[in-house]
């Protein structure tokens, strides 16, 4: 369950006292962020435990404003003396900072009043032994899948639980709990004919333990992905249709998230400056950011400033309809926050997507590949060759060559290049296979044409 707590939360009284202390020292506004959590993670390799970590952490951060001057600080020492000193020092620091006319808390009336249960929390506590067993089962399933799986880079299982509390001078106090469970493995396949080796991996990550894929299915899929890469070839440079699978297509949405971030926009570092309301993609393309998706890996009832998260249409019917903003970047751009403030303890808010996804179409990945006479199916991207100011895009890639609608052979050591504005404009088909394995998710995409550089 998602727990929405107010004045009954164990940290609520401490946060209230800190705010009162800051007020007594002259602060005009302030907010307090408290986070606590525990995590257990194990890694095995060839069944032997390679790494084990177990942590329990808590920390609190304070942000104070003296008019338009502000400062932030944090501590993991929750003793009364330490907390009092943090308040005093942060207030003293804020007085020395230059004024920023756009700084300050959101308006009091904009604080969220509802705290829906977003199904983000699972009380299941996995023991170290259970996590070791899950990781071993995933790795064993991969190693047993085929005689050509000859080695492993290991398997990892982790679980974490956490609580976040935010309080501010507007009287807002909110808290929510969340959990995350994940399992992955990375087998190595060896080509008996050419002595080549290939590595690939697969994983599952969910808010609730019972929703995880089985270790056996994770291992078998990882093995399948490693085996299919054996015998990789180079190809000649050419311009062809390119199909991005789920994993690589979501990276295109990640670039979109950066480009529509209020901070990139007001700093002049986005190729989407001045594009609001203009066509970015074909009419059948719609992208949402939904902070209240049940069970979503990016879901939360309120953002880093206490504003309600929401479902925002970023691209609707191909038109760029909204940027993603927090209060500060919104003020800089003359717009309202979209509830996308994201922050770490002791940091000032910035902008981050919640659950950003491209609405799926009705065509299966197999039919998309079948529609390509000669082209590239991308399954891995390498490097960060993206200029967010111009949209120029050039990344190392690996995948499969498509010949007459069939995956003909694996390809490697290639580069795909284009411009992100043109890539979004050239989306030709959207797959029906949307799955949320990250906060940013995308179904298979077919791009009309891109430059593929090889030999």
Image (cartoon, rainbow, N blue to C red):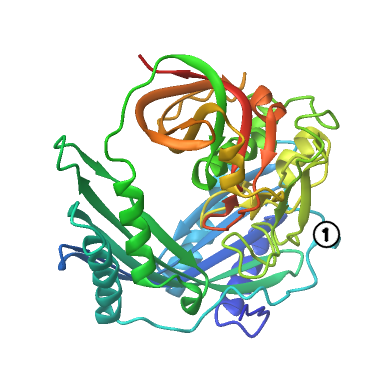
Q: With 341 as the anchor, is 383 left or right in this view? A: left
Q: What x and y, as percent, mark residue 27?
A: 67, 55
In the image shown, does 135 or 67 lie closer to the viewer? 135
Residue at image coords 73%, 74%: 115
Q: Quadrant of the C terminus?
A: top left
Q: Please tell me how crowded label 1 is: few (under 14), some (14-19), or many (20+) other residues with Cα within 10 Å.
A: few
Q: Position of residue 447 (x, y in %)?
A: 62, 30
Q: Relative to 276, say whether 434 is above or below.
A: below
Report if residue 65 is visible in the image.
Answer: yes
Residue 421 figure quarter: top right
The quadrant in which the N terminus is found is bottom right
Q: Quadrant of residue 414?
A: top left
Which sits in the foreground, 65 or 438?
A: 438
Residue toward you, 377 or 111 = 377
Q: Among all residues in the image, which is located at the extreme front?
A: 404
Residue 413: percent from left, percent from top: 34, 25
- Residue 146 placement, left or right of 32: left
- The answer to whether residue 270 is visible is no
At horizontal 58% and vertical 73% (from top left) the residue drawn is: 120
Query: Is residue 422 or residue 290 the one in the foreground?
Result: 422
Q: How many marks?
A: 1
Against 262, residue 170 (above or below) is below
Q: Secondary structure at mark 1?
A: helix
Give the percent coordinates (x, y) of residue 325: 72, 44
Q: Which residue is mark 1?
A: 110
């Amino acid at each position: 369950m998602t727990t929405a707590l107010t004045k009954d939360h164990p940290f609520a009284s401490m946060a209230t006292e800190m705010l009162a202390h800051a007020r007594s020292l002259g602060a005009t506004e302030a907010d307090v962020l408290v986070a606590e959590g525990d995590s257990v993670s194990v890694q095995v390799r060839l069944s032997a435990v390679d790494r084990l970590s177990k942590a329990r952490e808590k920390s609190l951060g304070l942000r104070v404003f003296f008019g338009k001057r502000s400062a932030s600080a944090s501590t993991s020492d929750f003793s009364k003396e330490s907390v009092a000193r943090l308040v005093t020092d942060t207030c003293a620091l804020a007085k020395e900072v230059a004024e920023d006319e756009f700084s300050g808390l959101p308006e009091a009336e904009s604080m969220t009043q509802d705290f829906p249960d977003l199904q983000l929390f699972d009380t299941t506590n996995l023991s170290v032994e259970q996590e070791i067993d899950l990781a071993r089962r995933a790795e064993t399933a991969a190693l047993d899948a085929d005689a050509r799986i000859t080695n492993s880079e290991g398997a990892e299982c982790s679980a974490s639980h956490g609580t976040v509390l935010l309080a501010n001078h507007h009287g807002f106090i909110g808290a929510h709990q969340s959990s995350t469970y994940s399992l992955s493995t990375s087998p190595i396949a060896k080509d008996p004919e050419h002595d080549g080796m290939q590595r690939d991996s697969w994983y599952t990550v969910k808010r609730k333990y019972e929703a995880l894929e089985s270790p056996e299915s994770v291992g078998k899929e990882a093995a399948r992905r490693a085996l299919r890469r054996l015998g990789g070839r180079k190809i000649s440079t050419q311009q062809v249709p390119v199909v991005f699978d789920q994993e690589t297509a979501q990276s295109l949405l990640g670039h979109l998230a950066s480009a529509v971030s209020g901070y990139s926009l007001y700093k002049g570092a986005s190729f989407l400056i001045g594009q609001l309301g203009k066509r970015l993609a074909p009419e059948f393309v719609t992208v949402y950011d939904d902070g209240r998706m049940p069970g979503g890996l990016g879901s939360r009832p309120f953002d880093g400033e206490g504003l309600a998260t929401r479902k925002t249409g970023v691209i609707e019917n191909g038109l760029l309809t909204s940027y993603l903003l927090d209060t500060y970047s919104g003020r800089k751009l003359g717009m309202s926050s979209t509830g996308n403030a994201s922050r770490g303890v002791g940091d000032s808010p910035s902008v981050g997507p919640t659950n950003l996804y491209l609405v799926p179409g009705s065509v299966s990945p197999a039919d998309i590949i079948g529609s390509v006479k000669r082209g590239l199916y991308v399954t891995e991207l390498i490097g960060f060759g993206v200029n967010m100011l111009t949209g120029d895009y050039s990344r190392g890639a690996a995948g499969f060559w498509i010949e007459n609608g069939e995956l003909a052979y694996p390809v490697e050591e290639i580069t795909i290049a284009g411009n992100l504005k043109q890539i979004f404009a050239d989306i030709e088909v959207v797959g029906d296979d949307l799955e949320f394995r990250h906060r940013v998710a995308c179904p298979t995409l077919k791009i009309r044409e891109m430059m593929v550089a090889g030999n």
